[in-house]
Amino acid sequence: MHLKLKEIIFILLISLASAAIFNSVSVSGVSYIYKPQIVKNNSILSLYETKNIFDANEGLFIDARPKSQYKRDHIKGAVNVPYNSSEKENLMRGIEHNQNIIVYCYSKRCNQARRLAKDLEKLGYTQVALFEDGIVEWKKAKYPVEVVEN
């Protein structure tokens, strides 16, 4: 009887370890850390909602503009993934598919962020939102921006 219990525990531990290893190497693995869904796919965020996500550090901000415009100014902490880049998958490497992502560009008249958001959804990102007011309204509100020094 005692031997059977040890065998059962051994099999359970091997199963658990196998599941954990498979999950960690799987592209669509489940995160071990719970991240609440702040943004929903295809949602459009207001300036107020975007600033709240920024202040809570609950999202990854992606600037869809060309690198030259990103260098001039961008939302503090944002990364640059130009909407027309053939390197989108490489630039997004290491970013979890369930990460809260906020995509923006210049203003409402700019389609680059909308296009990039659709591309990210096609790549399997499930929580992509659009901040369509863009960097123009962000700067008008005097919210934090960064400049890349050459």
Image (spheres, grey):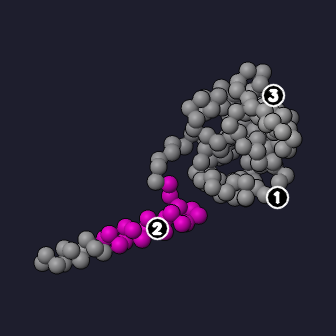
Query: Magenta-highlighted stretch: main secondary structure?
Result: helix
**Tag 2 secondary structure:** helix
Identify the magenta region.
12-31
**What quarter of the picture does the N terminus occupy?**
bottom left
Mark positioned earlier in the residue sequence (2 or 3): 2
Question: Where 17 falls versus 30 (above or below)?
Answer: below
Q: Amino acid at mark 1?
A: Ser
Q: Amino acid at mark 2?
A: Ile
**On residue 141, which mark appears?**
none
**On residue 86, which mark appears?**
1
Q: Marks 2 and 3, how far apart in space?
A: 45 Å
- Which residue in the structure is indicated by mark 2? 21
Q: Residue 13 appears at what percent x and percent y?
A: 32, 69
In the shown orientation, is residue 78 left or right of residue 32? right
**Tag 1 secondary structure:** loop
- Which residue in the structure is indicated by mark 3? 136
Q: Residues within 10 Å of mark 1 (few under 14, many from 20)?
A: few
Q: Residues within 10 Å of mark 2 (few under 14, many from 20)?
A: few
Which residue is depicted at the point 60% across and 33% down?
53
Q: Residue 106 appears at what percent x and percent y?
A: 83, 34
Q: Marks 2 and 1, how far apart in space?
A: 31 Å
Which residue is depicted at the point 43% across and 68% down?
19
